Amino acid sequence: MTDPSPSLRHRARQAAALGALAGALEGAAIAHGGRMHLSFGAALSLVLVCVLLATLMALAGFLPAALLARLGSAPDPPSRRHALTLGLVAFGLAAWYFVPVGLGMIRLDRWFGGIAAFFVPIGFLGTVHFNARHWLHKAEVGWEPKVGFLPLAGGLALLLALGDAAWLSQGPRAVRGPAQPDDPSVLLVTIDTLRRDHVSAYGEPQAVPTRAFDALAAEGVLFTDAITPLPETAPSHAAMFTALHPLRAGVLANGTPLQARFTTLAERLRDEGYDTAAFVSSYAVDSSAGLDQGFGVYDDDFLPGLHGLAEIRAVGLLQRLVMRFGDPLKLPWLLERPGLQTNARALAWLAKDRHRPFFCWVHYFEPHAPYEPHGEPLPDGGAPPDLDHRWILAHEKGFDYTPEVVEGLGRLYDGEVAWADARLGELLAGLDATGHRADTLVIVTADHGELLGEHGYHFNHHSLYDEALRVPLVIRAPGLQVQTRVVGAQVRVLDLGATVLDYLGLDPMKPGEGVELLGYAEGERSQSLLTTLYGRTSGALDRGTLLGVRSGRTEGEEGRPFKYLRDLDAGREQLFDLEADPGEVHDIAAEQPGLVAQAHDLVGQEAQQAISRTTEVDPATRNALKALGYLE
């Protein structure tokens, strides 16, 4: 009797070769997406990891496949069982990749394509099985191929891997458009959870020294009353990119993606021939949020180590499982990325040679909770307090926010603001080093603010109070004929898309409700923009819905700025005089019934839309957003 173990090892090597080919094909799929900016070495490393993981999966499936083949075939000839084993391994690998594709298509109501994807693994099973039977049968009668299956498959996998790496390192495919090399570029920087009154350019007593922001404001236009209509990360950014109120864009909470039927600013500029790239730092705005539409590069890979690791299906699935069944709060690298790393990626992309103008969005997650020290003294010169904000968030229900804790967390927040401003300074210095300073429109703002104990809200941005709504905004526009560098009229983050397109001489967004803002600086516009508001009293998605209206002061006109708030569940209406009562402490609704009635009617339609909408978030996303403090 001959020893069967060499035959078993040989069959396992053949199954592994199938896995290597599958991994190389996955690398080709990643390269085809072209959403990363990688060197050839980094791209090759990523593809080789794809090959390694797929090979291990094939080996893991080999023994179960061999057992099934033994149960499902006659004892002789052995080649029949071997061929069926390889066919079953190919079936498993194909199912690993194509079943999720089919499920995704069905979720998009593309039933024909989804069902077709489910049958693809059967085709792989049949193809590999019958070809293997043919080759093995020929070997049984004495035929010896010039090149065996193992060197042939291994060589093909290596060639594919090299081709994948070369393709991936080239970046996104060029998009033709009328844009010329000397057309203005655009840099948009959003600093998550940055309160307006903590930026020193605004001169508030609680401000933190923000040298980079202040220097930009000295050269550009500072808007003193910019607000977000919905103080959450993804909805606010969706408003920036679509020029639509979140109620119209349909993004009313983090975890609810922007639908592809909406045109984004990045799509408009891509179609004009711009290089487009985004470098984001939070899970709330990763590609699942739908904000990636139109970006050639969308860098949302937070995993440490190899760049692009999360693009591999096995790694991505493991990441989702950890977020679903683990504790994401203990694994911050799943949810966020430090601004230093985001800058490194963005600056590498900005420094590359290009023959087209660019649109680049850089998003910093500092100073969003949890607030953490960065190994430096805080802005007040003192050492960071001995507080673990991550632990506090994990035990927040029933946590006692004593005055000492509130003061300490406030100091940590100030440190995060200063740290984010330093990252902004590095980014702007890097932009200057590329030689693009004189031809780049620079916009720096925030998606929302933060409540630091005001109105009973501790270190989150729920509610519709001004601490959550008002954001810093500065625009530096080369060549702008400025009459005033400080604009006091109320403007919205949803006006930024219209501002960019108007500055570049392009048609406005359609549909769109944004207003271009540089006309305020040129003396062509002065009217404050009355704005409806949407929010929640807590992280719950099914209760506590808030609606409101906020007006601003228009220079030279009578009338006082006011804010109207309506709690749909409690049936409570409030009205605040923002000039006499900027802290929103004294409700004057009973004193101004006529104004309350007007505001009530104004938000009536929005109220019906809000009540009729339901927001569903899958469990893994819910856990991640809960760890970031967005959901309960």
Image: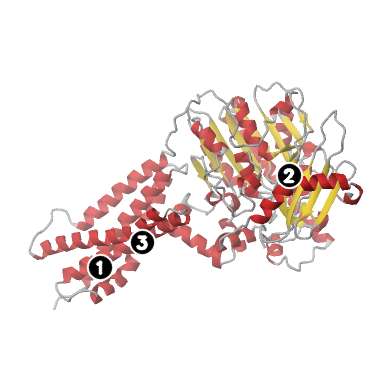
The circle on residue 95 is: 3
Residue 384 placement: quadrant? bottom right
Question: Which is nearer the eye, 630 or 6?
Answer: 630
Q: Amino acid at mark 1?
A: Thr
Name the residue beneath numbered marker 2: 532
Q: Quadrant of the C terminus?
A: bottom right
Residue 454 location in percent, x, y? 82, 54
In the image, what residue occupies the spot 43% across and 42% down? 39
Q: Kindly state the secondary structure of the residue where label 2 is placed.
A: strand
Question: Taking 385 as reference, is 105 left or right?
Answer: left
Q: Tell me what residue is drawn at x 62 percent, y 35 percent.
A: 497
> Percent position (x, y) of residue 408?
79, 57
- Figure check: 195 above or below 52: above
Viewed as shown, does residue 33 lie left or right of 338? left
Say which of marks 2 and 3 sits in front: 2
- Label 3 sits on a secondary structure element that is helix
Q: In the displayed image of the protein, which residue is found farthest to the bottom?
A: 1
